[in-house]
Amino acid sequence: MTKQTQKKSTKKVKEETENKKINWHEILSIMKRYYKYTIEYFWQWGIWRFIGGFASASVGLLFSYNLGKIIDIIVDNDWQAAVKAIIVLAFLAIFRMIIGYTNSLTSYRYDILSGRKLRKKAMERIHSLPISYFESKHTGEVISRVVNDIDKLQSYYSDSIAGTWSYLPMNTIVGLWLLLSINWKLTIICVISIPLFTIVIGKISMPIAESGKKIQECIATCNSYLRDFIEGIEIYKIFTMEKRHGKHFEDAVDEGVIHARKKSARQRVSWAIGSFNYVLPTVLSYAIGGIFVARGEMSIGDLVAFSTVLPPVANITHQFAGSYTGLIEHMGIAKHFFELIDEKPERTDGGDYSKSGAGVELEFKDVSYSYPNGLAVLKDCIFKVPGGKTIAMVGASGGGKSTLFKLLCGYYTSYTGEIRINGAELSEWNLDDLRRNIAYVSQESYLFDNSIKENIRFGKLDATDEEVIEAAKKAYAHDFITELENGYDTKLGERGVRLSGGQAQRIAIARAILKNAPLILLDEPTAALDTKAEFYVQKALENLSQNKTVFVIAHCISTIEKSDNILVLENGHIIEQGKHADLVSRGGRYIELYSSQIAREEAVFNA
Amino acid sequence: MPENTKDKTLSEKKNNILKDIKHLLSILGKYKVLYIIFMLLSSIIGSFMTIIAAETMRSLVSFFVDKDGSITVTRLIVLIASMTFYRLVIGQLINYVISILQIKMEADIRKRLFWKLQSMPVGYFHGSHSGDFVAKMNLDVTSVSKAADTLWDGAYTIINMAFIIPYFMSLDWRLSVVVIALGILFSIFINLVVRPMRKRSKDILKSMSEMSMTTTESVTGFNVTKMFLLQDKFSKDFSDGVDTIYENQKKYGNLSAWIGFSQMVITYGGRAAIGIFGLIFAFNGTLDVSVLAGMLTVYYNIIDSFINVGSVPSDMQKYFASSDRLYDLFNTSSEPERYEIGGTDPEAGVLLKDVEFEYNDGMPVLKGVSICAKKGEMIALVGDSGSGKTTLVKLLAGLYAANKGEIVVNGRGLSDYTLTELRQSVAYVPQDAYVFNGSIKENISYGKDNPTDDEIILSAKEANADTFIMEKPDGYETQVGERGIQLSGGERQRVAIARAILKNAPLLLLDEATSSLDSETELAIQATLEKLMKGRTSVVVAHRLSTIINADRIYFMREGKVVDSGSHKELLEKCRDYSDLFYKNFEKVAVS
């Protein structure tokens, strides 16, 4: 996280706590956005669901009305009316069946098409985000946005936008019209209480969204505990961490329960009031309607019709309450989703300053960099690397060496000073072009859940099988790969767990060889390996580094001595630089490091 | 998780609903009795109130139409009042209690699941993708809640039918027959559609879990994705996955629309039938108008029941698959309390005799290994990667059970220890030190139950970690991030060592890291480790000459066997392979 975004996020938290009230403006704008995102599908499918909602509501009410009226027909013993009623009922019923089919089909299509689009959008955004985003977020969180949240969003929206919001108003309009036409006085008496309770429901439902969000957060925490357990299982078992982590996990679950209870209580109360809205009119219609019938102001058939049509109308608030709580809850999720979409992507501007031939030239002019928390990592670094040369960085861990590499890769933007690559300032480069020029091999290389062949081919996506094998040979990986049962088609598990460290490293190097970038960044690629493994990896690296500009973080003396320039980094400062011989003769910090390294290498069985 | 075998058992179980329900109830655990009680209570009261509603309507109509005086105003008032009270108070209360029960049940399942997973052997998770795993668990847990919901629906349906159908019959059997016939037709039709829908929904789930895996890859491998400009390629893969989901969902949706259709058939077709036949019968003079009004009122309820008869089994199918999976998991055997691997030698700190071991994949890793260290001795395991050194250490730590042979730790056979005891007497520093999300302090504190701050700091100092920790802005409270991303490799390692120091166990297992640390720190740490080894039985996967020279005995391993053993000097003299390995490396140092 950069400093600015951190600031922003703390500000956001403050804002959230400040206005716990529902911001209608915000809800509306989120809904608008969602609608805009899925507009094509709305016009393709959603609209039919919308119209279907109108139709189903009106047909349903007309049906109820006609059904109620048959009481009158019977009482009046009117044959003609009976025949008419039979025809009307049959027609309406068949019509309603057809709508039932289309409604289900169209709403689901709208639902899944939107989901597909949102997922793609989210992934597109994730791929364009700067590294700092991932470093500040737990992956479980990011994943659940794409996987779980969208699922909930899409079905809610297709249900509500296309469903509820079409038949709700229709129920109101057609229902009221029918009721009024039966008996306007009774209608007014029965319906008058509805708006009042609706407002109360609105008030009560407000904090539900907040609870919904908190529940999600708790689940995300639980997920991260579970992931931690699965990935760190060996340490976990040996240090018998079960009890303690189990307790942490339980705490997270319990916190979720608290929020869920709050949510449920509120929901229940708002439903109860919703029921009041539904029950009171029914009771009134029976009681007052009965008096009207007794007085002869309306027929008994009218009363039956009235009480059959009334429930869906009175139910409006009930449904409204349901859709309202749903709305607020899902607005929280939608907000989460759009927060992801709104994350500032990496810049895509800038030009390509690649050079053919002698490797990349680097120049650092007074470069300083601090972490978002203010801790300075690099201070006024000045050095130059001519094309095709090898430069080594030495110094205690935590001295900022890896950070310097990350700067070169364009991961962090908030440095001061100038970083020139092939003469152009980093900010003038297009980041994709820049990265095309760099092959980065770290201590622990990430391999994907994919076949070995695919993993190597990630270095150059259009590489032929021959090129892949050629690269594997240069990386000294060919032999062990062919010894595997499925050879190049062997699938690697998560993080390549089924390979030894050295094997994984060589595949990563094969991948880098295939990429054939002119600048090689090596962040102690052999650090985690034992002798035999290191031996081959070292040879593979030699193949990778031929005729390239090589920038290496190293402890191994042979590598350091051979390099054309050595930077000694300490606490973010470059305190010495020069060739090995110069630095030795100077007798400064380098010689101290050097002698301790010699002592160590002598002590290391597998030098 | 071994997916195939589970699918097989699922298909074997077919649609044995009773068994599914039994499984579900067993997962619900301690809440199941309460849940069942409330489930039945709400169903009975709900069904009863439906009849009250119908009676109200019937009484109302006959009060006005028949005017025979058999219906009193008091009766009407009582009927209406009881309906009102139910709707407003009783019904809401019951629902509230049930929703709280469900929340608690879900939380309880989550917790028990986590405990259960924690108790599973390491091999259970072998090769499973953590993101995929987590997503699946979440889905399964929420599905169990839904399964409980459908169970409730099912109970309500049955009870409701038991109440309403006799009532309906008593009103007019002819109309009842029409309605019930329609309902049965509907149920048959639904069943026809549901079968292929099940297959589709399985397809959807599968493609969903694949997508979640691709997502995890993109997010966890962001570093490589960026540097190799793989965004487009991954976006395409992802988008293909999403398209597959869509295609599966589309097929599912086409089928499910027929359910929408048939629901309308029964809702409106049934009401129309009552209306039309009612009219005819009434004109015949064989049906009382008040009875017809009562039937129309109750019909809503009958439809609901028939719709449930159609949807409950399909919902059950959908959600019970999850509860089945969880049930299987809950009933998969956890780690045994102890491993049945004997051996006695009161003198031995560590003893392995003819130990054989293979992982689940059937590839033998250890092929009859015997090693021995007396109490307090330090032995070194030397050999190329893949020779089984690390596996051997993991056996000693009780992470895996050996297939054959004897193992003694600290004078007692392995079967003498519970796994917890065994692990408590072992400190393990692996090569790749995993640190857990949380603060540095927490990570160190895992070495001991409730350590004091002083103990933690002392261990950190001994592990040479105190300096770098104090340099962090939040010191010991610094959050290490997921997989310790905020720490460098060397820092992670030192945290791991501090953790082991704090544990202070009699057996030290050390998988030496070659050079994750810069040389100065490393020399210092080495001194610490040497101090740590003193007085303890230590088994070290060794890379350093100093370790090897100090070792009481060296075991030279190759391809799962001990090739030779002895002191460094002895081995140099008598073992050709060993001296080759050594001199090759020694020369490398000498030349540089």
Image (cartoon, coloured by chain):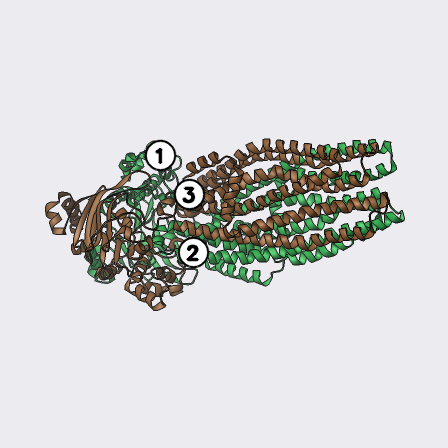
Chain colours: A green, B brown
Q: Are marks 2 and 3 on the same chain?
A: no
The residue at 63%/44% (across/down) is: B156
In this view, the residue farthest toward the left is B573
User: Could you say where residue B61 lies in the image, as x and y percent from the top left?
Assistant: 82, 44
Residue at the outermost bottom position: B454
Quarter of image, res A352: top left
Q: Which mark is residue A489?
A: 1
Three-letter residue code for mark 1: Asp
Labels 1 and 2 in the same subunit: yes
Residue B144 image position (x, y, % from top left): 52, 46
- Residue B450, percent across and down? 37, 64
Q: Secondary structure at mark 2?
A: helix
Q: Residue at x 73, y 44 (%)?
A: A170
Q: Chain of mark 3?
A: B
The quadrant the N terminus of chain B occupies is top left
- Categorize mark 1 by other alpha carbons within 10 Å: few (<14), some (14-19), many (20+): some
Q: Secondary structure at mark 1?
A: helix
Q: Are marks 2 and 3 in contact (CB under 8 Å)?
A: no
- When the figure is inspected, residue A492 is found, relative to residue B420, above or below; the finding is above
Mark 3 or 1: in front is 1
Provide the secondary structure element on which disc 3 rests.
loop
Q: CA distance from mark 2 to mark 3?
A: 40 Å
Q: Earlier in the sequence, mark 1 or mark 2?
A: 2
Q: Is residue A47 above or below residue B426?
A: above
Which class describes the residues within 10 Å of circle 3: few (<14), some (14-19), or many (20+)?
A: many
Q: Is B242 rendered above or below residue B527?
A: above
Horizontal and vertical percent position of residue A44: 63, 36
Left or right: B495 in relation to B276: left
